[in-house]
Amino acid sequence: MHQEITALNEKINAKSAFVEAIQDEIHKVIVGQVYMVERLLIGLLANGHILLEGVPGLAKTMAVKTLADTIQTCFRRLQFTPDLLPADLLGTMIYNQKTGDFIPKKGPIFANLILADEINRAPAKVQSALLEAMQERQVTIGDRSYPLDDPFLVMATQNPIEQEGTYPLPEAQVDRFMLKLCISYPNKKEERDIMDRMTTGAVPTAQAVISPDKIIAARSLINEIYVDEKIKDYIVDIVFASRQPEEYGLEELRGLIEYGASPRASIYLTIASRAHAFLRHRGYVTPEDVKSIGMDVLRHRIIVTYEAEAEEITPEHIVQKIFDHIEVP
């Protein structure tokens, strides 16, 4: 077993060299935001969609577009508005006068990287249409279903400070996102670098350094990354502690959790931990991989009670207490 892991580690180390090339190209355009860039790569490599939450101006749109530029792939930005219809997103059937038939006109969802800007501004029907495409990887127009291109990744943004005219995503739909990222402001030095870079009149651009085929091949490699039985038990303990905290000695969380993390949490935490190990050029998952990505996988899957809200206890506080308490293998 030890020899197999060593061989796998060498294989992953060699095959993951392109990660730095992508990051270097992205950082030619994006100043700082290392956390966001790394999580975007994890979502891409783990084939999981991402929900980004942050105030305007933090380069969310630019980061996604720059990532698409480095991968020679089709990128589309969709601005969600209250009057958007599902057909505006998915496409519709149009009448051909020459043949007298209805033919499908595919919508902008048929791309590789989709940025759903301000997803919470669109009504429930549009949100459901997008989330169905995310889950099924196909779109139905008329009486036919059309598969979406691979890779297909949705990055949705929502603004936490402007709630007027918004339609918050239901918890069951938010659960379909592998990661939820909370993007913060840059530090003082990064802000100065942003100012210098973006006020010269010449907008920096990223060059393509990898093809979509290599991303798909990397996903297969990530599935081979070794996860020890103790790590698997650790992941399950973390998820179950969010559902039954008393059984894990977390009496302080009694009455604070309305609903714990779903089984998707266990699945996504395992896959995302593998992708995190891949970014570190390792062929095996460590507890540190689980802890590093755990907050992003779990923060939107734990629903707190009214009592917790009254005490200003957030899902992040609960996730942190679980990680601090559960014994690391």
Image (tube, rainbow, N blue to C red):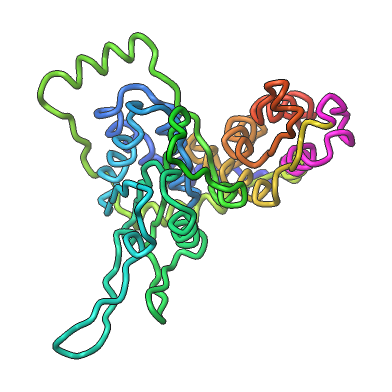
Q: Is residue 61 left or right of residue 269?
A: left
- Of residues 130 and 8, the one nearer the viewer is 130
Return the x and y of residue 292 as percentages of the image width and height. Answer: 59, 30
Q: Residue at x 66, y 46 (%)?
A: 265
Above or below, 278 against 132 in this view is above
Horizontally, is 23 left or right of 69 in the view? right
As drawn, the residue found furthest toward the top would be 188
Residue 7 shows in this picture: no
Q: As displayed, is residue 66 above or below residue 327? A: below
Residue at horizontal 33 percent and vertical 9 percent from the top: 189
As for residue 99 lying within the magenta part, the answer is no
Which quarter of the figure has residue 187? top left
Give the residue at x 74% y 34%.
Answer: 305
Residue 234 position within the rendered picture, expressed as x and y whole percent measured from the top left: 75, 38
- Identify the residue shown where x is 39% and y is 25%: 33
Q: Tell me the quadrant of the picture where the C terminus can be found.
A: top right
Residue closest to the far bottom:
99
Please state the extent of the stretch shown in magenta in the rendering.
235-254
Secondary structure character of the magenta stretch overall: helix
